[in-house]
Image: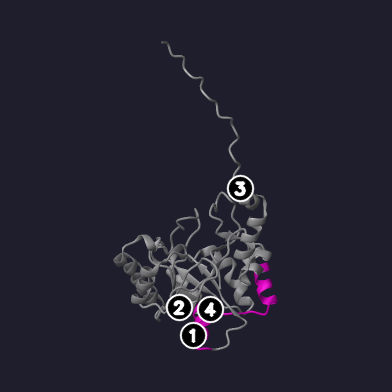
Amino acid sequence: MLCYHGVGTLTHGEDPSGLFISRGLFRHHLDVIQGQGYDVVAVGDLWRAMAAGSAANGLGSISFDDGLVKTAREAIPDMLDRGMACTIFVPTGLMGRAHPDVEDELILTGEEIQELAGEGVEIGAHTVDHLWLPGMSYADKLDQMRRSRATLEDLLGKPVTSMAYPYGGHDAETVRAAQEAGFELACGCSGPAPWSPLSLPRSPIFSSATTLRLRLKMAGLYGPVHRLVADSGPIGRWRAKPPPEPPHRERRVRPRERTTG
């Protein structure tokens, strides 16, 4: 499962966190995914296929966090044209407002979310205010999750059973809150990890994600290769080098003081 945020062209100054990739690069990513024979389905469909014991080989999923307008305009039409499904996770308290980390980039309105759902895009929750959940009290975590789910269900007129943790942040208490809030599945965003319905691993894709990095992430090899390169490069050699011994200095013996008799 791959986790994107923004698709579209922004300058580095406009996107200091590197959340966006260009539409051209995203199309190259889709070419790679199709070239490897993946059938791209929504996050919920992928998990249900796995939970039912169905053959999930050859299935993959692409999801977009934050529900950005530019992503909906530039990425999703390319996916739908290729017969690919996808999932968008929306912070409901920010609908129709600017993204908190990317200046001047808007988040989808309720009407736009309804239109995407009508085109077959899976809509999932991303809390209300897009906050770091592990740093919140249990009651506040639960409130963020319950209200976001209720807002989307009222908007779409159907159950919303999936969510993504903002910034991928979750701990045992956060997972317990997701279960109590009624979600069947919830996604992190930190690369390969054990599969669990309320802690589904996704590989994050940022602006630095070349097609080579994408292939490595899809194979679950990006982390090991990255560590290998780091360990074998100049920094790794510097880390492995034992610290220099202090220079040897001869001990100076103080002359014995003269005594007078």
Q: Disc 4 vs disc 2: Cβ atoms closer than 8 Å?
A: no
In magenta segment, residue 46 = yes
Q: Nearer the viewer, residue 237 or 5?
A: 237
Where residue 141 appears, x then y in whole percent?
34, 66
Image side of residue 99 versus residue 55, left or right: left
Q: Which mark is residue 242?
A: 3
Q: Which mark is residue 40?
A: none
Give the residue at mark 1.
51
Identify residue type, mark 2: Pro
**What segment carries the magenta color?**
28-53
For the point 45% across and 73% down, which residue is it? 199
Q: Nearer the viewer, mark 1 or mark 3?
A: 3
Q: Which mark is residue 42?
A: 4
Image side of residue 148 versus residue 18, left or right: left
Q: Disc 3 vs disc 4: Cβ atoms closer than 8 Å?
A: no
Q: N-terminal of the two: label 1 or label 3?
A: 1
Q: CA distance from mark 2 to mark 3?
A: 45 Å
Where residue 176 appears, x then y in whole percent?
36, 73
Callout 4 crowding tier (Cα within 10 Å): few <14, some 14–19, many ≥20: many
